Amino acid sequence: MMRRSHVLSALILLGASAAAFAQAPSLAARASATQGAAGPAPGETLSQSYRGSQSSNWEYQKVAPFKVFDNLYYVGPGSVSVWLLTTTDGLILFDTAQEPLVDHVVDSIRKVGFDPKNIRYILLSHGHLDHFGGAGKIKALSGARVGVLEEDWKLIEAFYMNKGRGNRDPGVPFSRDLVLKEGDTVTLGKTQIKVYHHPGHTAGSPSYEFTVYDNGRPHRALLFGGPGQRNGVEGGTQFLNTIRRLKKEFADLEVPIHVHSWLTTYPDPRGGTVFEPAQKLAQRKPGEPHPFVINAEWRRWLDVAEAGTIKYIEQEKAKAKPQSN
Ligand SMILES: [Zn+2]
């Protein structure tokens, strides 16, 4: 449980960061206009800039953390999302980002008023380094269990067996811990997280379902672990099945939570999944709808993803066929 003093200091911090946040794009635009410094490139949205023109600008990536719901905070860098879910019995972290931005994640958790030592679970969206690269460090400081599905534990293990490949900092290695599967429920305090197997980005991409609260009002939320299809016809077909399952089982979803602010495969028409709605949230007046509660946009996004994946599979099939002319 958060003590009252923590709540107050969190609110003060959030007030400050929300105000700074609301100004961020105009400041960034001014900076880039005057000195060619950090900011979205012409034609880029703010979210897009974190994975586009500013993808290696580590200072730019260190965005101020902010509260999105009563029990959900954004504590990631700009390029890859890290979400902190609070419960009555400790914290759950979804993804970790990667070096050199892991300390930023840890600092962000402190800035919103929580002790990173109270993280009980690190639930990974999938076995790619930009999502799991901080898990070893954060596990070491908190003792948290790290969970991902079997198929993606294999990806993580293969990565650490070949560590040193490329110029990417692999972070602190960690070994197989919690092997999640479809139908599992992770329970912490009064919070329950339902685990789904939604492959297509990787073979073991999960989604995590839980409830978020907006001033006490519950909303159905799903953190979707696979931001876009990969791996040819096989991955494309898996992704298409996943999207069709989502259309059936999550047609009434209110809060889609994504693992990147900018989804490169199927960009969010709002300009990004995180920072554009966050700007609206910072300026929200009492009684106005919550900008992260977006059922209609979610359904539209699924339609776009379905059409795009069908096209992708056709293209991949054409590539695989010998050319006849
Ligand atoms: Zn990935």
Image (cartoon, rainbow, N blue to C red):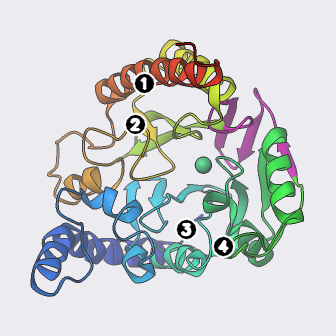
The reply to whether callout 1 and callout 2 are in contact (CB within 8 Å) is: yes
Is residue 291 found inside the magenta-colored segment of the image? no
- The residue positioned 23% from the left and 83% from the top of the image is 37
Q: Nearer the viewer, residue 229 or 217?
A: 229
Task: Name the residue beneath numbered marker 3.
Answer: 2
- Residue at the farthest bottom position: 35
Per the image, label 1 sits on a secondary structure element best described as: helix
Q: Nearer the viewer, residue 322 or 268?
A: 322
Q: Label 1 CB, ligand 1: below 8 Å?
A: no
Q: CA distance from mark 2 to mark 4?
A: 26 Å
Task: Name the residue beneath numbered marker 2.
Answer: 266
Task: Name the residue beneath numbered marker 1.
Answer: 308
Q: N-terminal of the two: label 4 or label 3?
A: 3
Q: Nearer the viewer, residue 182 or 13?
A: 182
Q: Which mark is residue 168?
A: 4
Q: Label 1 crowding class (10 Å Cα cut-off): few <14, some 14-19, many 20+?
A: some
Foreground tag (4 vs 3): 4
Q: Label 2 crowding class (10 Å Cα cut-off): few <14, some 14-19, many 20+?
A: some
Q: Is residue 316 above or below residue 145?
A: above
The reply to whether callout 2 and callout 4 are in contact (CB within 8 Å) is: no
Magenta span: 178-205
Q: Nearer the viewer, residue 124 or 51?
A: 51
Per the image, label 4 sits on a secondary structure element best described as: loop
Q: Label 3 crowding class (10 Å Cα cut-off): few <14, some 14-19, many 20+?
A: some
| Residue 90, picture quadrant | bottom right
Per the image, label 3 sits on a secondary structure element best described as: loop
Q: Label 4 crowding class (10 Å Cα cut-off): few <14, some 14-19, many 20+?
A: some
Q: CA distance from mark 4 to mark 3?
A: 37 Å
